[in-house]
Amino acid sequence: VTNGFVAGGKEQGVPTKFELAQNYPNPFNPMTNLSFVIRHSAFVSLSVYDVTGKEVTSLVNEELAAGSHQRMFDASGLASGVYYYRLQAGDFVQTKRMTLLK
């Protein structure tokens, strides 16, 4: 496990920490990948917000097993600009910024 992520896409042990990766690609149009690692099973919430703090979509809202996860975010119905995505898994919370360019 490197930086909490499963190396090479194959499980090589239990993740050692929670982590929210930077979306890829960034900037993006209109799809981007959001990856995260959870250390142990937990109720997970992954949501996207606009610059005013309004939630534009919820990508995950469920119990997930420990490990590496990813979700695609389709922003084709949104305006260009800066958006934030927030991961909450148990007590862990992290927010990152992404840019949509059309």
Image (tube, rainbow, N blue to C red):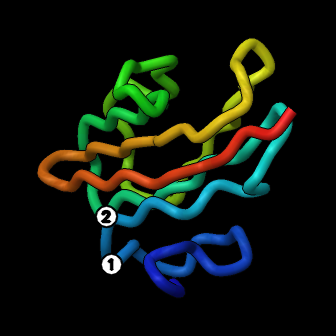
Q: Residue 73, percent across and down?
A: 67, 32
Residues marked 1 and 2 touching at CB (< 8 Å): yes
Question: Depth check: 11 or 80 in front?
Answer: 80
Residue type for callout 1: Thr
Write the residue at 38% across / 39% down: 64
* Secondary structure state at the residue bearing disc 2: loop
Residue at image mark 1: 16
Q: Estimate the spatial distance between the alpha carbons at disc 1 and disc 2, rounded to whole Å.
A: 6 Å
| Identity of the residue furthest to the top in this view | 77
Question: Depth check: 28 or 102 in front?
Answer: 102
Question: Depth check: 14 or 19 in front?
Answer: 19
Write the residue at 73% across / 30% down: 80
Q: Is residue 83 left or right of residue 10?
A: left
Other residues around mark 1 within 10 Å, as few (<14) / some (14–19) / many (≥20): some
* Secondary structure state at the residue bearing disc 1: loop
Residue at image mark 2: 39
> Which is nearer the N-term, disc 1 or disc 2?
1
Question: Depth check: 30 or 64 in front?
Answer: 30
Q: Residue 94, percent across and down?
A: 31, 55
Q: Is residue 7 above or below residue 101?
A: below
| Identity of the residue furthest to the bottom in this view | 2
Residue type for callout 2: Arg
Q: Is residue 30 left or right of residue 65?
A: right
Q: Residue 37, percent across and down?
A: 44, 60
Write the residue at 28% across / 43% down: 88
